[in-house]
Image (cartoon, coloured by chain):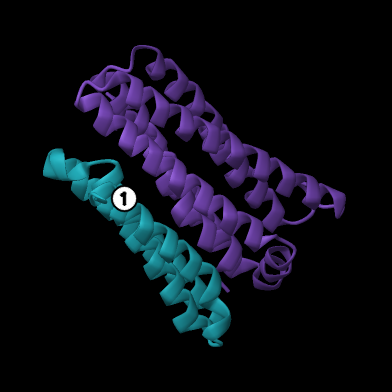
């Protein structure tokens, strides 16, 4: 019977494959990049919560890791948007 | 203590990735050309390898918490083997790039690409050593510390991969 770790692994593999397959299906850079980086954020959060087991640590550590993921991914998307719009 | 190290590493990688994103805004055509020369399929395969290694490490920590030391050691061995495969695939990728005449000074893209992925690869190697050290005793606290570092390395790659290889 698969447990949470197994399910997280399957979800991560599926999202990793989607990261490779999806970009050519979204021809426009702005939404395409948003999809790619959203997938990265979802994968990162699953790793943090389930593999790192951050559900079991103080909220401060959980919040810091989640904030790191959001800030890096959002900054990368804003920079890519600047490249597209300039 | 391990969380202080992990957040220091995440801060360093975050700054590196931010620098990469800003440099891309300054040199969009150079970065587009550099990205086109990368093997995103091989890097995508490496994502699957590292995620699977992270799963093995998480299972090792779970077994260690249940005082199942032989099981924990087996999962740690699997995580290290997959980590070794990641290193081998990354070195093969570098060899392909060097074979195309690409180097650290080819362009700003490749300077940052080699620095970022090389810095990450060093962390993968360090992570394998840490997993090997905690594997000896396979005690819960040690395995949890070692695998937390390993998941940080996994997390950084998951974010780094699309930013370097795929974002247009």
Q: Give me the chain that's cyan.
A: A
Query: For numbered disc 1, what is the local secondary structure?
Result: helix
- Where in the figure is residue B99, as x and y percent of width and height? 86, 50
The answer to which of A67 and B74 lies nearer the viewer is: B74
Label 1: few (<14), some or many (≥20) within 10 Å? Answer: some
**Residue B6 visible in the picture:** no
Please name the residue shown 54% across and 77% down the image: A23
The residue lying at 72 percent from left, 63 percent from top is: B34
Instruction: Please give the name of the residue rendered at 35% of the width and 55% of the height, measured from the top-left corner.
Output: A44
Q: What is the residue that sits farthest to the front in this orientation?
A: A1
Q: Which residue is mark 1?
A: A6
- Give me the residue at 68% from left, 70% from top: B32
In the image, A63 versus B86, the foreground residue is B86
The chain under label 1 reads A
Q: Front-most of B116 and B96?
A: B96
Q: Give the image quarter of residue B63.
A: top left
Q: Colour of chain B?
A: purple
């Amino acid at each position: 019977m698969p447990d949470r770790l197994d399910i997280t692994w399957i979800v991560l593999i599926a999202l990793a494959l989607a990261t490779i397959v999806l970009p050519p299906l979204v021809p426009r850079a702005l939404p395409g990049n948003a999809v790619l980086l959203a997938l990265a954020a979802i994968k990162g959060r699953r790793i943090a919560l389930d593999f790192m087991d951050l559900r079991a640590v103080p909220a401060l550590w959980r919040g810091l890791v989640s904030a790191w993921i959001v800030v890096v991914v959002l900054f990368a998307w804003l920079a890519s948007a600047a490249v597209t719009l300039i | 203590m391990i969380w202080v190290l992990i957040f220091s590493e995440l801060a360093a990688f975050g700054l590196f990735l931010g620098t990469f994103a800003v440099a891309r805004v300054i040199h969009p055509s150079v970065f587009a050309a550099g990205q086109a020369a990368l093997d995103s399929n091989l890097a995508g395969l490496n994502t699957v390898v590292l995620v699977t290694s992270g799963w093995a490490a998480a299972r090792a920590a779970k077994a260690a918490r249940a005082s199942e030391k032989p099981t924990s050691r087996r999962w740690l061995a699997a995580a290290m083997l997959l980590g070794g495969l990641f290193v081998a695939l990354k070195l093969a990728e570098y060899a392909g790039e060097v074979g195309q005449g690409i180097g650290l000074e080819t362009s700003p893209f490749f300077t940052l690409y080699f620095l970022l992925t090389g810095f990450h690869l060093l962390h993968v190697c360090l992570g394998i050593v840490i997993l090997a050290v905690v594997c000896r005793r396979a005690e819960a606290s040690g395995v949890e510390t070692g695998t937390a570092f390993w998941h940080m390395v996994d997390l950084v790659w998951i974010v780094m991969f699309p930013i370097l290889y795929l974002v247009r």
